[in-house]
Amino acid sequence: VSLGAQLREAIDKSQMVPFYQPKICLSTGRITGFEALARWRHPDKGILTPAFFGAAFGDAELAPSIRRQLMGKIAADMRHWLDQDLDYGRIAINLSSADFGQPRLSEEILETLEQAQVPVERFEVEVTETVLLGRSSECVSAVLNQLRDRGIRIALDDFGTGYASLMHLKQFPVDHVKIDRTFIKDLDSSTEDEAIVAAVIGLGRSLHLQVTAEGVETKMQERRLRALGCHDAQGFLYAAPVPGERVREVLAAFG
Ligand code: G
Ligand code: G
Ligand code: MN
Ligand code: NA
């Protein structure tokens, strides 16, 4: 059976679930929000990461189906956390090029949040520079502007790895840049990486963007990022992505 057929069945059986990884404020140590990451709750193989099914994010039919399933579950989780008085901060979802190929993308996201009666200001979408280059940039721009006009925040993911990163900051509505983890990995030992990260943080701050470092794994990296003025950090140093049921305990650990 092809992966595509297995995935269609997985979606029909509601096996696509969001896991949540926190972002930590480097000045307060508190959680500012979570990134939702797709996982496949496989009946035999357990929890599968996109390493096994990430190709689906490039498929014109599968990508929107997975996104719809995740959006529904994320909105329900947000509703549940609000009812429990849990301050989850802001929740982000990743969007691929194939998501932008679908008509009514922004309407669908907004309707899902509204039906669950969760505040749209507590929601963010993450797009990579590859996504910005993927389709006609007017189409991507239009969708991002529709979302942003309604209060949803836009994050530029894997920042620095794309072609013409700086041009994208000018051309697209962006609130938040996420520095790709390849620049964070050797931050302790590489003067080049340190210079690049310092420059991105400076640029982000002067453009009044939120700046998050991805893939933070060590206290040394954390100290360096704090000294450089980075706002937030995300990575295994704090927590791996967890299922929604464990968000309460992750919040408590950083309370
Ligand atoms: O969570 P993990 O490290 O396994 O994710 C691997 C890759 O898959 C990352 O680049 C991440 O952005 C991407 N990814 C995870 N969940 C989603 C999703 O729901 N939609 C899209 N488009 N990409 C995702
Ligand atoms: O491309 P994107 O930034 O959306 O990818 C997010 C993915 O990065 C998550 O799926 C997660 O599994 C992975 N990730 C999160 N924290 C770390 C980390 O500290 N180190 C590494 N190597 N990967 C991480
Ligand atoms: Mn991301
Ligand atoms: Na990233």
Image (cartoon, helix red, strand yellow):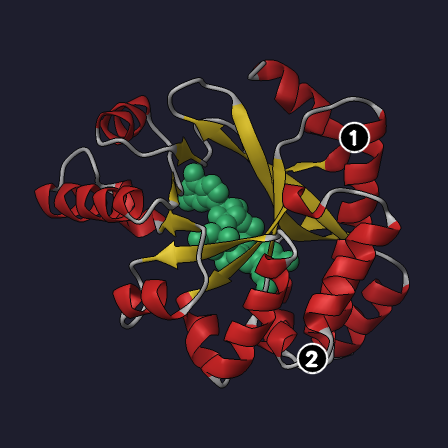
In this picture, residue 41 sits left or right of residue 99 = right
- Residue 150 at x, y percent in the picture: 65, 56
Residue at coordinates 38% horizontally, 25% vertically from top-left? 26
- Name the residue tied to disc 2: 102
* The one of 160 and 203 positioned closer to us in this rendering: 203
- Residue 188 at x, y percent in the picture: 19, 33
In this picture, residue 214 sits left or right of residue 43 = left
Residue at coordinates 85% horizontally, 28% vertically from top-left? 83
- In this rendering, is residue 199 above or below 129? above
Q: Quadrant of the C terminus?
A: top right
Q: Earlier in the sequence, mark 1 or mark 2?
A: 1
Disc 1 to disc 2: CB gap under 8 Å: no
* The one of 66 and 3 positioned closer to us in this rendering: 66
Helix, strand or loop under label 1: helix
Give the amino acid type for the residue marked by disc 2 in the picture.
Gln
Residue at coordinates 26% horizontally, 24% vertically from top-left? 220
* The one of 10 and 122 positioned closer to us in this rendering: 122
Instruction: Choose top left, top right, bottom left or bottom right for residue 228.
Output: top left
Q: Quadrant of the N terminus?
A: bottom right
